[in-house]
Amino acid sequence: MCGDVAIQGQVVGRVPGRIRGCGIEDAVKVRSVAGIGLSQQAVMDCKTAAALKTWLEQSAKPALAKKGGGLRQLRVAAHYVCRTRNNQEGAKISEHGRGRAIDISGFRLADGTVVSVLQGWNAQRYKTSMRRMHQGACGPFGTVLGPEADRFHRDHFHFDTARYRSGSYCR
């Protein structure tokens, strides 16, 4: 489906956008990545699915390995949607509108515990894991935004595969 990326889902093909600049050429609808389920199917390009796999294997799974039996599911807040950045009128097209972004609002553990980014970011039990996952996304993803980035990202992690000459943008 996406080369050697361990994802379950289906090939969607071309997804057109209603706003100029939106759309995905080779979209996939993902149900799980690297054995971790998604709370809803997420539409993205293969590059973003591959970055998600890398982040899960190198950061998220290890960060939560000793919490509640380990990570079982990502709580997806947003994936492909044709819109401007932060839904602001006149702004540039969001990476969500290009199929190159996913927003994660929380994590379901094997014991059923759900840890939200909003509550877990400063919770004694989860803050180290949260920060490890946030920092670990820098590299696989070109843009990583979290609770300390701005008012739009207080309750979730925004990951996208935009690339910059200066390297990853992580806040």
Image (tube, rainbow, N blue to C red):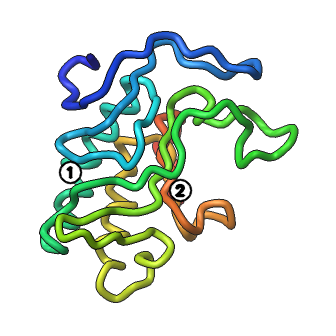
- Mark number for residue 145? 2
Under mark 2, the amino acid is Leu
Image point (39%, 61%), residue name: 134
User: Quick one: SS at disc 2?
Assistant: strand
Q: Which residue is mark 1?
A: 58
Q: In x, y percent, where is residue 6?
A: 19, 31
- Residue 148 higher or lower than 139, as above or below: below
Image point (63%, 30%), residue name: 97
Image point (45%, 19%), residue name: 27
Q: In x, y percent, where is residue 38?
A: 34, 46
What's the distance in space between the residues labelled 1 and 2, CA to CA?
A: 18 Å
Q: In x, y percent, where is residue 99?
A: 52, 28
- Quadrant of residue 50 within the rendered picture: top left
Q: Name the residue nearer the viewer: 1 or 90.
A: 1
Q: Name the residue nearer the viewer: 31 or 92.
A: 31
Q: Report whether 150 appears left or right of 3.
A: right
